[in-house]
Amino acid sequence: MVVVYLLVALLGAAIAIYAVQNNGVVVVRFLGWEVGGALSLVILLSVLMGIVLTALLGAVRHWRLRSRIRQLESRLARLSASEPQGVSQAPR
């Protein structure tokens, strides 16, 4: 656990150094909106948005796969219940 804390501390220090070294002001324009801010903040917010969007897409895929698994488990249970007792199929 100490190793994890050290890695998090090193990552935090790297982010802090990055933010201090990249404090120039930039203007971001998108669809008529115009926002100014520090370069480091713009980049970090972009990375954060990418992480959030990727996580959302992964969650949707996970939900769909989980739904499909439940559907197949239900189908398997129905097929197992309808199979006569004492009759089993050979494994493939």
Image: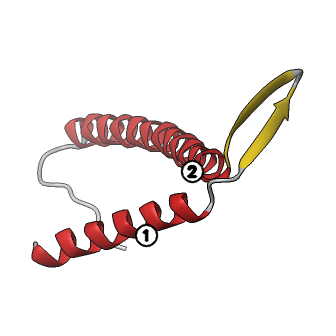
Task: Look at label 2 and name its amino acid.
Answer: Leu
* Quadrant (top left/top right/bottom left/bottom right) for the C terminus: bottom left
Residue 76 horizontal/vertical position (percent): 31, 43
Residue identified by numbered label 1 = 14
Crowd class of label 1 (few under 14; some 14 to 19; many from 20; radius 10 Å): few
Is 3 in front, or is 14?
Answer: 14
- Furthest residue in direction top, as rendered: 32
Residue at point 60%, 47% (across, down): 50
**Residue 90 seen in the figure:** no
Rounded to the nearest whole Å, what is the CA distance between mark 2 and mark 1?
A: 12 Å
Q: Is residue 15 left or right of residue 92?
A: right
Crowd class of label 2 (few under 14; some 14 to 19; many from 20; radius 10 Å): some
Is 31 in front, or is 24?
Answer: 24
Residue 73: quarter of image: top left
- Furthest residue in direction bottom, as rendered: 3
Residue 51 horizontal/vertical position (percent): 53, 49
Residue identified by numbered label 2 = 44
Q: Is residue 83 above or below residue 19?
A: above
Residue 91: quarter of image: bottom left
Is 22 in front, or is 6?
Answer: 22
Residue 49: quarter of image: top right
Mark 2, secondary structure of its residue: helix
Task: Look at label 1 and name its amino acid.
Answer: Ala
